[in-house]
Amino acid sequence: MKNLLVIAASVILLQVLYSTAAHAQGATAGALPQNAGADFHEDQSALGLNPDQAHRLAAYIDRSLAMNRNDIKNKPGKEELMSRAKELIAVLKLSCTPKDVDLAGVNTDHENGKLYQNTLYEVSCTDGLGYFLKSRDRLKSAGAKPGHPDAANAFAISCLAADRLHEDDTKNGINSELYCHLPDNGGGDMKVVGQNLLTRLGVNCNVTEYKWFGSKPDAKMEIAEAACDNSTGYLVETAAPGGNIKPSAMDCNAAVRNGLECRMTPVVKPVTLATFREYLEKTSIKCKINDYNQIKLLGRESLKQRYVVEFKCAEQPDGLVAFIPLDGNTNPFQTEDCRGIKKYGIACKLTTIN
């Protein structure tokens, strides 16, 4: 049973990290146009697992795979490890030209009278990325070399995702070895990885923090956030296991215009129709907006500097005009219907009042 749980946990972890039905930021209902952030996902699972459960699963895999890299006896030579890593990279269709490899953990188990070996490798790639590669392979006999790996019994997790899990496990008091150790993978310090990546991309940033941000599962892409010592920041897109995109960076000001908001670097969000919709949703006013054709910016007050915005919805048959204060404006939020707004010399555009 334990052996089955090891494999099940491995599969679930992979789905947790790259679920295509995870929570999306920026996605909206109806005919609202899609932005660049609409397919962005955080590490929540279609299986109903929350991040804490995912982390506990990762810790279970960590212990079960016996990440005992310092205690492994009769460790194969570097050439043999590299050959095995290249096989796994090929069957997993991983975008990685391996530069270095280490054996992170190994153990054996029996299932239905057959002997299997669970092996965990850490690889660094020439493009600055790194991964854990896990394989479960049939052994003909104790001490024999495993056969060729296959994708059904293997998976990969990036150093970036592993670092996120390791960080949260540490906060929860879990002793986890699930972080990349190789020098080219930062030796356990993701700031080094982020610095090397941004330098390769020609970005001028002295990295102070480099953390997991999320993923775009459909594009097989991971996103990290880099904070720089000059109060700027970047979102760095890299290939997730199975993806083949080239690393790229977007500064936080550009990111917010594309539907993604940096967490470590504050930016001033541009005012858009989505801004007004989001503001209205936070109030007690009943007005469901499914299409941006239901929103119209009528102007901005010269004195109080509130935005005057019309909304058209079934809940407000006489129309709704809102005076919306933004950007630290301390004037009150106010609403009128299309009849009452006439006293301000304003006419509704979306709702006709007889």
Image (cartoon, helix red, strand yellow):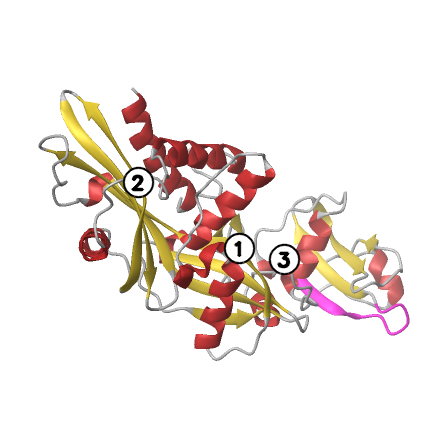
Type of residue at label 3? Answer: Arg
Instruction: Classify mark 3: residues with Cα within 10 Å, few (<14), some (14-19) or many (20+).
Output: some
**Cα distance in 3D space between marks 1 and 3:** 8 Å
The residue indicated by pointer 2 is 72
Q: Is residue 297 magenta?
A: yes
Q: Position of residue 107 (x, y in %)?
A: 27, 33
| Residue 154 drawn above or below residue 343 | above
Q: Is residue 77 magenta?
A: no
Residue bearing mark 3: 263
Q: Residues within 10 Å of mark 1 (few under 14, many from 20)?
A: many
Identified at 56% across, 40% down, the residue is 170
Q: Quadrant of residue 8?
A: top left
User: Which residue is label 1 attached to?
Assistant: 213
Can residue 106 be seen at all in this image of the molecule? yes
Residue 185 image offset from top left, x and y in percent: 41, 60
Q: Is residue 33 visible?
A: no
Quick one: 48 or 278, which is closer to the camera? Answer: 48
Q: Secondary structure at mark 3?
A: loop
For the point 63% across and 60% down, which residue is it?
274
Q: Is residue 286 left or right of residue 346?
A: left
Q: Nearer the viewer, mark 2 or mark 3?
A: 2
Label 1 or label 3, whichever comes before in sequence order:
1
* Element type at mark 2: loop
Q: Quadrant of residue 149?
A: top left
Q: Is residue 297 left or right of residue 186?
A: right
Instruction: First in sequence, mark 2 or 3: give its number.
Output: 2
Query: Mark 2 belongs to which amino acid?
Result: Ile
The residue lying furthest to the left in this view is 140
